[in-house]
Each structure stands twice: as C-alpha cells, then as structure tokens.
Image: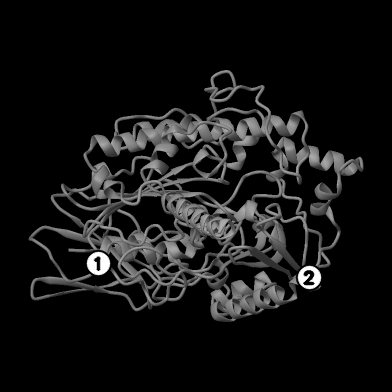
Amino acid sequence: MKIKYFNIWIVISLVFLQACQDKKDSNVDTTNASTDLELPDRPNILWLVTEDMGAYIPPFGDNTVATPNLSKLANEGVIYPNLYSTSGVCAPSRAAIATGMYPSSIGANHMRTNSNMDKTGLPAYEAVPPSEVKMISEWFRKAGYYCTNNYKTDYQFKAPVTAWDESSPYAHWRNRKDNQPFFSVINFTETHESGLFEPYGFREIETRHYHSGNKDYKWKNFGESHAKNRKTEEETTIHLPKDTKFKIPPYLVDNKVTQRDFWKLYNNIAEMDSQVGAVLKQLEEDGLLENTIIFFYGDHGGPLPREKRLIYDSGLNTPMIIRFPKKSQAGKKDNQLISFVDFAPTLLSLIGEEPKSYMQGQAFLGEYKTKERDYIHAAADRFDGETDAIRAVRDKQFKYIRNYRPEQGYYLPIEYRERIPAMQELLRLRDEGQLNEYQKQWFRESKPREELFDCSVDPDELNNLAENPDYKEKLIELSAEMDRWLNEIEDVPNFEERQLVNRLWSGKDSKPKTLEPIVISENGKVSISCETEGASIGYKIIKEGKTPKSWMVYQNPIELSAGEKILVQAHRIGFVPSKTVEFN
C-alpha cells in the first residue's frame, strides 16, 4: 500500500511540475507569441534601426549595460531572438530589407556595387531587380501612407524619387498630412563599427534624433566626415564605468586593448538607447503610441572582428523587439526563424495587403502570415576590395556553411576593419605566434569546403562537425536545402563579378537608362507612361511658381488647373533615372 501511494504521489508531483513549467513557458517563451493580434486597420509603422548590433542588450540576456528605453520597449512588446540578416554587412542586407529579395538574386551581394572600383577594375553599377520590383516604401505610398527615412539609405541602388515622401536628416512623421498613416524609418549610427576607432568619441550629428521635424535646427559639422564631427572623448557621455570587466569571446584576445573596445561598444549602445528614448517620447507626445507598431532591430550582427562581414551567427544574428498597439502580447518571446527578406511581405501583411508575388520572403505577422520558416539563408561575397564566395543555411540548431574558395583563407585584409584596435591586436599577436587555437582559426591559409556547427552548444561556431559521421544526416539535409535555395533564387556562387555586371546590363557597355516619360493630355487630364518596363513614375505639380519638395507616385491620370505645370521623372531600380520632363 505504501508503494502504491508513493507511486501516485510521484505522478501527481510530475503533473504539478509540468503544469508549473507550462505556465512559466506561456509567460516567457511562446514559440509563436504574436499569432492572435488585434491591430488597427491602417496602423502606423515606426522602424528604429541601429547598426552593427549583436544581442548585447538586457532583453536578450546581456546585462552589461542598462538600456532603460529598449528594456521598456521589450517589456511592452515581443522579443524575437532568431532574426538573421542575409549578409554580415549593411548594404546587401538593406537591399534585402528594401525589396524582400535575396541580395545574391538581384546583383546586390557585393559590398558596395558603386565604390572600390579602383581595386576591382569594374565600372560602378547598381543592383538590378526584376522589372516588377519596387521598394517597400513605394508600395506603402501607393497605399496612402506617408513614408520617411531619417536618413541612411545604402541599398546597393539609387532610390527612385518615388521611394519616400522625404529622405533626409529632417524626415519625420510630424511632416505628414493630418491623420495620414505613416511608415517612418529612423536610423541610429552610434553603434556602427567606426565607433570603435581611435580617437574615440560620439558623433555630434547624432543629436538629430532629438530635433527631428524641426527644420529650423542646424547641426554642427553636418555632412562632414565621421572623424570631423565627433565630440572628443572628454565631451563624450560616460554610460558605463571604464574599469568594467567584460567577457571576451574566445575568438578575440582578452587584453586591455580589447577590453577598451568592449567598453566603447557598450557605451555606444547606451547612447543609442537614449536616442531611441527621445524618439519614443516624441511618438507618445503626439498621441500616436497606441496606433503604431514599433520595430527595433539592427542591420546585421556585431561590429567586432570575426563578427561583421562574416556569416557566422555573430555577424548575422541581430535582436528585434516589436511593440504592438495596446501592448498586445507584452513580455512574450517569439522564437520563430525570421530573415530580412521577410520584412517587406510582413509590412504589407500588417496593413492588410497581400505580399507581392516576386518577394522571396514570407510574412511572419498580419493577415497573410504564413507557416513558420524552417531555414534562414545568407551569403558573403566581395567586401570593399577583397572577394570571397560563401553561402550558409541555418535551422534552429545547426548552421551549414559552404566555402566556394576553400583554397583561400578566411581573413580578408580590409583596411576599414583594421582601424579597430582589437583587430590590430589580433594581427600583432598573429605575427608574433601568440594566438591560441580558437583565435588562429580565422587566419588559416585555407578553409574546409563544408562546415557544420551545432549552434546550441557551440554558439561561436568553432567546432566543425562536417567530418563527424554522427552528423552526416544533418549535413546532407542542410546541403540539399542550400542547393534548393540557390536554384530557386538563381544564385551562382563564385560568379565572376565582371560577368555579373554584364548580365545586369544585358551585355551592354554602360548602365541601362530609363527612357523619358511620355506625357499626354486628353479630356482635361494628364496621363503619364514610360516605355521602360517596370519604371516608377514620380511627378510634382507646380502651382503659382512653387515647386513641392516631395515627388508624388503616379498611379492615375491627373487633373491640372489653368496655369499649373507638372514635372515628371521615370526611374527603374538599377537604371539611370530619366531626365525630368516639364509639361504645361
């Protein structure tokens, strides 16, 4: 009898413990927490985008420096720990964000397409997406939204005049028409890799976020180089004690130089957090908080050596927080895999519009939300003047990397990165033969063709399992998934860049040009067209000699009053824009 009662007690105890665990998980870690959302029909959307940002903030488990504004945003919203960029660097990643397409499918995979031509010997060129592709902001403008960008672009192509109502240091939702819904992007550059350079100091220009919308404000040193517009170190706000001891990842050297760079990194994050707070305060002051979906995320992973530009998780994974109106799903965590190519279709889904058929991502929120993705994908090609060809695929646990130039070492001598003191220390100690086995991996003269990492136990991706027979099935699975993906997006890794330019330009010797728009007046209305397939058409109506600053997106014939003129420009992404045509 005692044994019987004892067994019953065990069962009851296990059920109780499981119930407690289920309750705990439901409050903290719901795999798809943002499923049942009640959203306004036409919500405002605010993007707060910082640069070079790993999961270095308290909502994602790193309590090194306080970020009160981001922590509050996370407490009132949902955190997404499994967001991955499509590249470990900004311009290709921003191309994916803007279009919903993988950079290597549209010629946006090389960093950057319109510079470093002295090293590559190539002409400056731009990514050329399929003719039907528009920037996500243009689709929003067509839907009646006021769209602003403050103020970084860097899409691997020149944005058409139809992309934004305003893209400038003054761009702000406050400049829209009364009650017009908005999509506003505010970029924070304080956490950028260059924030680790010497001499160290904050950029004076960053105060713009406290004055956005005020066009009478004049910034010091606006338009000058990063070095010239920095505050000195003595003028820089100290958010974190300088004697703080930091945990250094095993691929970096733990010494005074690296410790100082980590202090800079976290101090910059705290400064960025204060700027985020200033923008959120403006939103609340305007009474817009509960009608706005707020996104916070980084443009790729961290800024440190062996992070930025690489497609290990340290270069791809960036934290995301989304606050929904009325704090819906507040305090939850959504563990689904999300790629940057998912942003464009998700934004359309959130305003009740079906994602465009050309988009290679999928909606993870809203009316057209799809099944959770099984994999994310990434690529690395040219960075400045140095070229490699690497592709990656990851599920929730494992990362598979395929190196298309195994005879070439990992490390690329990129001058910009070598301005970071911690990078200089790695090179110095490499030359002196003082690096340990983990630190030396990056400097191997060749690399395996295939790599496989169990990221759950090896988050720094230092233990390659590709030759381990215990993981053969996983290797085969992820390799097959990579082949499927490459075929689907028509990506040819290691495709010679000169050939890429030739393909983008359809075999011609110069960048394709958008034809001049055709303007026709009939029955009191002006119709506009362009014979360049896929060209966006922008126009301005000049009234009483006054020309508006913003270009409107042409959709339907326009009525002009007597004495009015119209300016028209056509532009297909990746092409040279047309000349501006004036019509009376």
Q: Distance between the Cα atoms at labels 1 and 2?
A: 50 Å
Above or below, 219 against 350 in this view is: above
- How would you rate the neighbour count of disc 1 (Cα within 10 Å): few for under 14, some for 14-19, many for 20 or more? many
For the rendered model, the colour scheme is one colour
- Given the image, on which type of amino acid does mark 1 rest? Tyr
Q: Which image quadrant for residue 142?
A: bottom left
Which residue position is annotated with label 2? 449
Screen quadrant of the C terminus = bottom left
Of all residues, the one furthest to the right in this rendering is 433
- Residue 480 coordinates in the image, percent (x, y): 65, 79
Please give the name of the residue rendered at 58% of the width and 69% of the height, measured from the top-left corner: 104
Q: Earlier in the sequence, mark 1 or mark 2?
A: 2
Looking at the image, do the residues carrying marks 1 and 2 touch, with CB atoms under 8 Å apart? Answer: no
Of all residues, the one furthest to the front in this rendering is 1
- Residue 305 coordinates in the image, percent (x, y): 70, 45
Above or below, 423 against 551 in this view is: above
Numbered label tally: 2
Pick the front one: 76 or 288: 76
Please give the name of the residue rendered at 17% of the width and 71% of the height, measured from the top-left corner: 557
- How would you rate the neighbour count of disc 2 (Cα within 10 Å): few for under 14, some for 14-19, many for 20 or more? some
Please give the name of the residue rendered at 32% of the width and 75% of the height, measured from the top-left corner: 530
Pick the front one: 157 or 75: 75
- Find numbered disc 2 in the image and state the secondary structure of the residue it sits on: loop
Screen quadrant of the N terminus = bottom right
- Find numbered disc 1 in the image and state the secondary structure of the residue it sits on: loop
Horizontally, residue 425 falls left or right of residue 342, namely: right
Q: Which image quadrant for residue 447?
A: bottom right
- Given the image, on which type of amino acid does mark 2 rest? Arg
Horizontally, residue 484 falls left or right of residue 254, namely: left
Which residue position is annotated with label 1? 554
Viewer-nearest of labels 1 and 2? Answer: 2
